[in-house]
């Protein structure tokens, strides 16, 4: 069916879209292998030769194994013109320790370099330190009851230092504790200080370090809620952040998309499905010149 859709004059994009989105990523890998056996060429290369623009980018993403996709997105973020820090933050703050270890291996194999070395070469300071800590994929497991209150008090003291914020304390705790442990620390932090940890981070840090710390906190509290917010932000302005929208929809499609949809509806009072439809309809009208 895919071969027929790309054969002859014109390409049946609806057929390609229907087929690929109704299959899991593992099934797409099987289809890719069978296509090469039957037609003697790589399916992804064939699709790229027939498609273009954002649709081509989306289809190639759908055809890429999840870990390889994450590795390729990190490589693109590091090797493009300037570093796309938002991509580094999103992936390293949200993936599990096991996934990060797999990403490091695949990055070396498929991207021809060491991820830690590339991140070190493109970032600096406390931002770099927390990224590298997350990259180790070696967070503590479970909850250490005797450490909860101690961690909370250390974070409070670190944010109230006489000579600015003690970023190292924040980095050490956020970079090494499990999500379960951090949630309890944040509860204790609010109980003792009267403030949410997010408010303290926003008041004490700035720039990429602030964004990375907030991402770690939000993912510790709820990964689906973090991605719901990221999707909302990607569509809230006049122009959609197409790359972020596609990256999240592709990478979370078989992981926690139903949870993300539920969080989106709860947080913003609209369905994710409808929001994407409305956003793209508006953009299509603007681009075609029918409005605006």
Image (cartoon, helix red, strand yellow):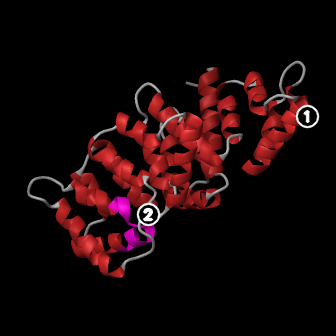
Q: Secondary structure at mark 1?
A: helix
Q: Secondary structure at mark 2?
A: helix
Q: Position of residue 219 (x, y in %)?
A: 45, 59
Q: Provide the residue span drawn in magenta.
A: 174-184
| Residue ID for mark 2 | 220
- For this rendering, which residue is in front, 280 or 214? 214
Position of residue 102 in the picture relative to residue 16 (left or right)? left
Q: Position of residue 254 (x, y in %)?
A: 67, 55
Where 104 falls versus 187 (above or below)? above
- Quadrant of residue 245 in the image? top right
Q: Position of residue 233 (x, y in %)?
A: 47, 44
Q: Quadrant of the C terminus?
A: top right
Q: Residue at x 85, y 26 (%)?
A: 6
Q: Quadrant of the N terminus?
A: top right
Question: Which label number is shown at residue 68?
Answer: none
Position of residue 50 in the picture relative to residue 60 (left or right)? right
Q: Residue at x 24, y 60 (%)?
A: 169
- For this rendering, which residue is in front, 268 or 240? 240
- For this rendering, which residue is in front, 49 or 131? 131
Of circles 1 and 2, which is in front? 1
Outermost top residue: 9
| Residue ID for mark 1 | 38
């Amino acid at each position: 069916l895919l071969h027929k859709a790309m054969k002859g004059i014109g390409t049946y994009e609806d057929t390609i879209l229907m087929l690929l989105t109704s299959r899991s990523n593992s099934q797409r890998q099987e289809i890719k292998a069978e296509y090469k056996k039957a037609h003697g060429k790589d399916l992804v290369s064939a699709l790229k030769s027939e498609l273009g623009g954002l649709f081509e980018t989306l289809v190639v993403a759908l055809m890429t194994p999840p870990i390889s996709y994450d590795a390729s997105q990190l490589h693109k973020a590091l090797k493009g013109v300037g570093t796309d820090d938002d991509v580094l933050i999103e992936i390293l703050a949200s993936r599990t320790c096991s996934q990060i270890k797999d990403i490091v291996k695949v990055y070396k194999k498929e991207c021809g370099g060491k991820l830690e070395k590339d991140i070190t070469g493109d970032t600096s300071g406390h931002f770099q330190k927390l990224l590298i800590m997350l990259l180790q994929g070696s967070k503590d497991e479970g909850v250490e009851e005797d450490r909860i209150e101690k961690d909370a008090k250390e974070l409070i003291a670190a944010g109230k230092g006489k000579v600015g914020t003690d970023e190292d304390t924040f980095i050490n705790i956020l970079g090494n504790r499990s999500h379960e442990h951090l949630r309890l620390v944040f509860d204790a932090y609010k109980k003792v200080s009267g403030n949410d940890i997010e408010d303290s981070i926003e008041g004490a840090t700035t720039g990429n370090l602030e964004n990375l710390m907030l991402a770690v906190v939000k993912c510790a509290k709820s990964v689906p809620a973090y991605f719901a917010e990221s999707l909302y932000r990607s569509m809230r302005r006049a122009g959609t952040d197409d790359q972020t929208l596609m990256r999240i929809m592709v990478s979370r499609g078989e992981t926690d998309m139903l949870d993300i949809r539920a969080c989106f509806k709860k947080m913003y009072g609209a369905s994710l499905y409808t929001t994407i439809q409305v956003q793209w309809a508006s953009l299509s009208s603007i681009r075609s010149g029918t409005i605006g």
